[in-house]
Amino acid sequence: MPNNRLSVVVTRRLPEAVETRLKELFDVTLRDDDTPMTRDELAGAMAEADVLVPTITDTIDAGLIGQAGERLKLIANYGAGFDHIDVETARARGIMVSNTPGVMTDDTADMVMGLMLAVMRRMQEGLTVMQGGEWQGWAPTAFLGTRIGGKRLGILGMGRIGQAVARRARAFGMQIHYHNRRRLRPETEEALEASYWESLDQMVARMDVISVNCPHTPSTFHLLNARRLRLMKPSAVIVNTSRGEVIDENALTRMIKAGDLAGAGLDVYQHGFRGNPELVNMPNVVMLPHMGSATMEGRVEMGEKVLINVKTFADGHRPPDQVVPAML
């Protein structure tokens, strides 16, 4: 009997439960080790597969898409962000792109609060002292941080994650402000107790904390550029769990070094997976290795979204999480 199952190539190791289900449903090629595919390996996979399942570590640009075989009709991204995929070129070639939105909302919002607390309460400095065996005992003026309650939080991007951050921050007693492409409905604003700022310049100048929760698009690249960063109060803190490209990282580094900003909590970076080396050893900067969605529950749910998208495609329908032009 001929094998009519879809040929699916997965570019990275996924949770075991997800890989098991993929093997049950499709003719799947899994990654033996957890290293990113080379460009040549990606090209080879795209030349032979019906479906490619990449992650954020795979840059699927116009050049690679141009090498795709006639069989490739779906790029089912494992992750919500899709700025590493040239969606417009894929569409022009008749290749659909899907993603996994929504499943990491709470996990990422939790990480925003964790980074905010870590920076404002100087946890990085405390850990360094303890791990170095340098603590000499408690002192009334040692490691004095900043109280989080009562502070003004400016949320840049009030989608699912931004709203989840707002709900958590309200529980900590913060005042919620936001800037977004579109203003929220009045009832949503009221439920979140959130104040809308049409002018991003005016908002950033008045906030104690800025949380970046917008996607990376051509219109958000360096949205927090050197000019806007200079509008912020010297006592303000930036937290970024979205995309590094939204902030001019070199300008941010200069300002923190000069004492023009109080600190930053970063889970994403402008240039791939390495932040500015000058940020690494700054005591008032907390840097994490893109851990915002790193819970077992979240990663399994992402895999389940991929499975639904691919299975729906296999059944002759459009994937429920197809990336459409309005999202670009």
Image (cartoon, rainbow, N blue to C red):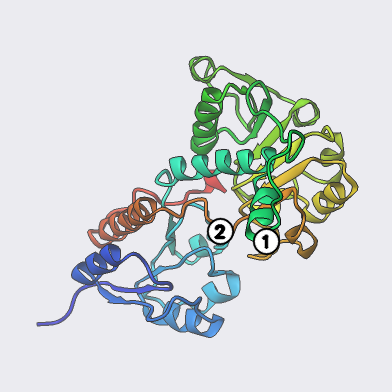
Residue 228: in sight, yes or no?
A: yes
User: Residue 18 has which mark?
Assistant: none
Please tell me in which quadrant of the rendered image residue 304 appears.
bottom left
- Badge nearest the viewer, 2 or 1: 1
Could you tell me which residue is drawn at 37 percent across and 54 percent down?
A: 302
Indicate the secondary structure of the residue bearing disc 2.
helix
Image height of 305 relative to 229, above or below: below
| Residue matched to label 1 | 132
Q: Residue furthest front?
A: 137
Q: Earlier in the sequence, mark 2 or mark 1?
A: 2
| Residue matched to label 2 | 88
Could you tell me which residue is drawn at 69 percent across and 24 percent down?
A: 152
Amino acid type of disc 2?
Answer: Glu
Q: Is residue 314 left or right of residue 298?
A: left
Could you tell me which residue is drawn at 29 percent across and 67 percent down?
A: 16
Image height of 264 relative to 272, above or below: above
